[in-house]
Image: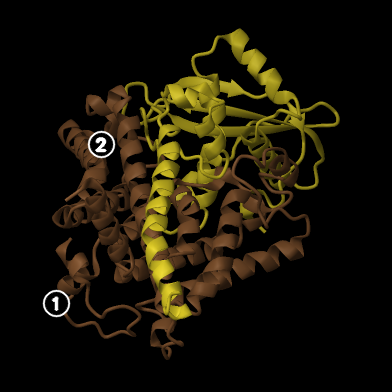
């Protein structure tokens, strides 16, 4: 029979279990990050497979995509424009709603609307990238898919609601029933034919539902 | 010596190393940086909160609920404006409490939950620094980040814990550190890999495009940076070299110092020349966990002197000093 007191037995047990438990924890950490790492590269047979264990493991909260200006930076300036239609069928003029935010953010280093700019850019980039390189027919099909309220991408919803909010503010007291957004990509400043249109993507009309206090103005 | 004896020896070496908390100064600096960044995030976005995260904002609730698998659930996915504002202000208050290191172990829980909730509420409003914060938030729960520069470090020492409990807590802290370091390696390694897939980074013209984008046109030296292909290519290749080398540099004592210096140069550059202030500062903050306590003390000219509440040995352990 052992004469070892209970505290000492407990300490001995801890000393025996702690090192292998630590090794197991490190192995778990290694496996976790391996699974995260294999799904990150954009051109990757594992991530392209779509349904393997690694992809299911990281989705949704562990998904990461580290591709700032990668693989290539977008070589054009983005413009976001919106117009609205009243019940009589008359459309307003196209109005830019992104450039003023961009210029305001550029004017000061800690501008609180920097996050709004990030939001608008990300909302615009996904539709732009989806539409790039497509034929007119393919683009048309894409735009029709985006019109379906059940499958409309969050980015498109964001742009439409933002545009609607801006137009509601620009035309106070007027009532609209439809909004339409146009995303333009123009040549960079400093390049030959700076400002020339590279791509124009006009989304289909959508119900006029404005986001509350468009672009954060009270 | 048999293989099993050697393995046992290595395991015990590892266990001893993890039984003492490392990089307490760096962890505390990280707390200061992230607490400040999140508090600023909440405070500065107050006027835009409804637009960015509100139920009827640019990312409305019905869209969030439809696509909520994108990042996960969020406490801010509520219809009531009053409840939303209460949660938002709570997020700001816990961020301030976390920043000053007040009851940090407890405050870290609502800090992580509320910050995570806000970030996941609208995935479109995340920049790169926000994404890194999002994936590293859980590790903050296990990190001892209040050993220095905090109200907690000035309070009377609590009842000493049992040796076993201290060992487990130290091991969890060190595991959290390892996770942070590996995550940083993934960030830079993946960025390098993705850039190498692009022709413009290989031929050195990528930054020539970036400096002419209206969003990132440099507020300083615009003409020089956008006009000199040599400068653009040099900075571009430096970026690639740094990002590719980072995952290897940080595991050696001297390499870490080089990594920190280069990271501050790179991200300082993005702040000064591209106006990416929030992102650049966030990335610099994460570099604080790279240096050991001994390295910080040497930097401060106070090697061997540590005037703070002793939760751990006052100076770095021999194992830490050796690295």
- The residue under the point 40% across, 38% down is A34
Q: Which type of secondary structure does the marked residue at label 2 adopt? A: helix
Figure quadrant of residue B311:
bottom left
Indicate the colour of chain B.
brown
Q: Which type of secondary structure does the marked residue at label 1 adopt? A: loop
* Residue A23 % position (x, y): 37, 53
Chain letter of mark 1 equals B
Q: Residues within 10 Å of mark 1 (few under 14, many from 20)?
A: few
> Disc 2 designates what residue?
B226
Chain letter, colour yellow in render = A
* Residue B181 % position (x, y): 33, 53
Q: How many marks?
A: 2
Residue B123 placement, left or right of A2: right
In this view, the mark in front (1 or 2): 1
Q: Considering depth in this image, is A6 or B54 the residue closer to the camera?
A: A6
Q: Considering depth in this image, is A97 or A155 the residue closer to the camera?
A: A155
Q: Residues within 10 Å of mark 2 (few under 14, many from 20)?
A: many
> Disc 1 designates what residue?
B301
Chain letter of mark 2 equals B
């Amino acid at each position: 029979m052992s004469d070892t007191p209970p505290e000492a037995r407990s300490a001995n047990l801890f000393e025996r279990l702690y090192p292998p438990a630590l090794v197991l924890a490190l192995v778990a950490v290694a496996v976790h990050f391996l699974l995260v790492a294999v799904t990150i590269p954009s051109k990757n047979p594992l991530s392209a497979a779509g349904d393997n264990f690694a992809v299911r493991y990281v989705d949704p909260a562990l998904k990461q995509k580290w591709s700032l200006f990668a693989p290539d930076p977008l070589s054009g300036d983005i413009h976001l424009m919106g117009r609205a239609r009243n019940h009589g069928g008359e459309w307003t003029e196209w109005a830019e709603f992104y450039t003023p935010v961009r210029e305001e953010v550029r004017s000061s280093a800690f501008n609180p609307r920097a996050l709004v700019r990030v939001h608008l850019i990300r909302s615009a980039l996904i539709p732009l990238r989806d539409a790039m390189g497509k034929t007119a027919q393919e683009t048309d099909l894409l735009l029709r898919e985006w019109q379906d309220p059940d499958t409309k991408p969050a980015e498109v919803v964001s742009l439409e609601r933002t545009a609607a909010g801006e137009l509601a503010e620009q035309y106070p007291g007027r009532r609209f029933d439809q909004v339409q957004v146009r995303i333009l990509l123009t040549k960079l400043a400093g390049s030959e034919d700076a400002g020339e249109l590279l791509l124009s993507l006009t989304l289909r009309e959508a119900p006029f539902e404005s986001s509350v206090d468009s672009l954060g103005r009270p | 010596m048999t293989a099993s004896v050697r393995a046992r020896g290595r395991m015990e070496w590892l266990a001893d190393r993890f039984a003492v908390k490392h990089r307490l100064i760096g962890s505390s600096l990280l707390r200061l940086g992230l607490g400040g960044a999140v508090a600023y995030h909440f405070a500065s976005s107050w006027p835009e909160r409804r637009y960015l995260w509100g139920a009827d904002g640019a990312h409305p609730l019905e869209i969030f609920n439809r696509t909520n698998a994108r990042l996960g659930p969020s406490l801010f996915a509520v219809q009531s404006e009053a409840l939303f504002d209460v949660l938002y202000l709570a997020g700001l208050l816990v961020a301030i409490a976390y920043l000053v290191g007040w009851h940090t172990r407890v405050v870290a829980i609502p800090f992580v939950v509320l910050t995570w909730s806000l970030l996941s509420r609208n995935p479109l409003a995340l920049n790169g620094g926000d994404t890194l914060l999002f994936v590293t938030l859980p590790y903050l729960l296990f990190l001892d980040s209040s050993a220095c520069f905090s109200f907690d470090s000035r309070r009377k020492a609590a009842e000493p814990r049992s040796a076993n409990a201290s060992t487990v807590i130290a091991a969890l802290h060190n595991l959290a550190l390892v996770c942070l370091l590996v995550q940083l390696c993934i960030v830079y390694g993946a960025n390098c890999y993705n850039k190498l897939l692009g022709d413009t980074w290989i031929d050195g013209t990528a930054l020539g495009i970036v400096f002419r984008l209206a969003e990132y046109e440099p507020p300083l030296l615009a003409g020089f940076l956008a006009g000199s292909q040599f400068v653009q290519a040099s900075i571009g290749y430096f970026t690639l070299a740094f990002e590719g080398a980072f995952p290897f540099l940080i595991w050696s004592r001297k390499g870490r110092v080089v990594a920190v210096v280069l990271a501050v140069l790179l991200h300082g550059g993005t702040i000064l020349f591209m106006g990416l202030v929030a992102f650049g500062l966030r990335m610099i903050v994460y570099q604080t966990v790279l240096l050991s306590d001994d390295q910080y003390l040497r930097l401060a000219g106070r090697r061997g002197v540590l005037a703070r509440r002793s939760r751990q040995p006052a100076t770095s352990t021999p194992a830490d000093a050796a690295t």
